[in-house]
Image: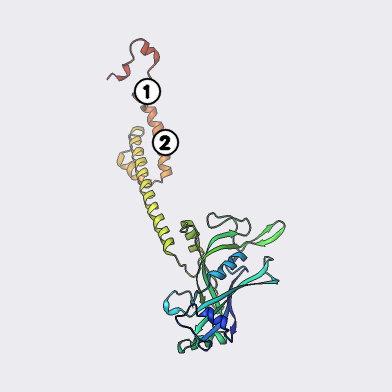
Amino acid sequence: MNSIIIKNVQAVSNHELELINQYTRRPFTADEIYTFSVMLCDNEIDRDFERFDTEALKTLSQLFLGKTGIFDHNMKTGNQAARIYDTMVETDSSKKTSYGEPYTRVVAKAYLPRCEKNNDLIMEIESGMKKEVSVGCAVAQRICSICGADHTFVGCNHKKGKTYTVKGTKTVCSTILCHPTDAYEWSFVAVPAQPKAGVIKMFKHKKGAMHLEQILKSMQEAEDGLFLTSEEIETIIGHMEQMKEMAACGKAYREDVSRNVIKLCGLAQPLISADVMKRVTENMSLEDLKIFEKAFRAKAEEIMPLRSQLAGIPVKESATGKQNQAFKI
């Protein structure tokens, strides 16, 4: 999903100046402003076998209004280069995507002030050296194009980029990005000599922070790094605290099972000392400990029946006045 600067805007109309001056602290004239148009994103399958649906592009066109253009997704103030002042969604019905839908793209108009600092950047844009851009955004749903599973919550067995036969037609599996919730920035990136340069996408559930499974999946899929929001970091920390608590409970349970194994071993196999059995249990898995506990318990009950003192008293004893025999020492 390569995004490119598609043309330069030679003349700035009065209407465009009004749009631009919404973002400036003082009114700028046409001579003070340099503008250009850029294709931000489209509905074609990208190099990660992901694509936006048409409704997502419409939403993104609004979310990107006023967003800053930076370099290489480096979110530092000094990297701010331009700002988007207008966007539009363009559909070319004569052109089809690889999966057969009309080609649709989001085109934005951006501006930067004409000044000595920006002369080099303007020259690079004019000469085509600064040509490709990519976007950083968040979406609420990531749908499998084969089965419709929402990867935001659940996974499926289909692999992105693999070809499947659906209703007799061979289809390349891709992830459909739906319901954008935020647009962070757009960046000038390196020319195609850098193979991993492309659209950066970040995913977040629109009703709160991401699930840990979703964050880990995004981290595994990220090739050039991943930006995490404060909510996502809080989610990871929260799950780590839960995992620590669960680990403590699991450790206590394992220790309890180990003690039972050592105690029952003393009854079932008295020739094995408690110290030896303790060393053995330290290297055993929980499942193995449970198996040993069950086996030693069965053996111990053969040797010394583990019968409660309050077990049922035969009725005939009660009838003969011997109902208290079970309690005599």
Front residue of 37/27: it is 27
Q: Secondary structure at mark 2?
A: helix
Residue 241 falls in image quadrant: bottom left
Classify 155 as above or below 306. below
Taking depth in this image into account, of 185 and 31 the one nearest to the observer is: 31
- Tell me how far mark 1 sits from mark 2, CA to CA: 22 Å
Name the quadrant containing residue 235. bottom left
Q: Locate the C terminus by quadrant.
A: top left
The numbered mark at residue 294 is: 2
Q: Position of residue 76 (x, y in %)?
A: 42, 76
Residue 308 visible, this orientation: yes
Q: Could you tell me if residue 280 is visible in this image?
A: no
Tell me which residue sits at (42%, 77%) in the image.
77
Residue type, numbered disc 2: Lys
Residue 34 on image: x %, y %: 53, 85
Badge 1 is on which residue? 311
Q: Amino acid at mark 1?
A: Ala
Residue pictured at 56% horizontal, 60% vertical: 142
Local packing at callout 2 (Cα closer than 10 Å; few below 14, some 14-19, many 20+) is some
Direction from residue 53 to residue 219 in the image, left or right: left
* Horizontal and vertical percent position of residue 303: 37, 28
Q: Is residue 316 above or below residue 198?
A: above
Quadrant of the frame with the N terminus:
bottom right
Sequence-first tag of 1 and 2: 2
Q: Can you name the residue that lies furthest to the left here?
A: 329
Q: Position of residue 39 (x, y in %)?
A: 59, 76
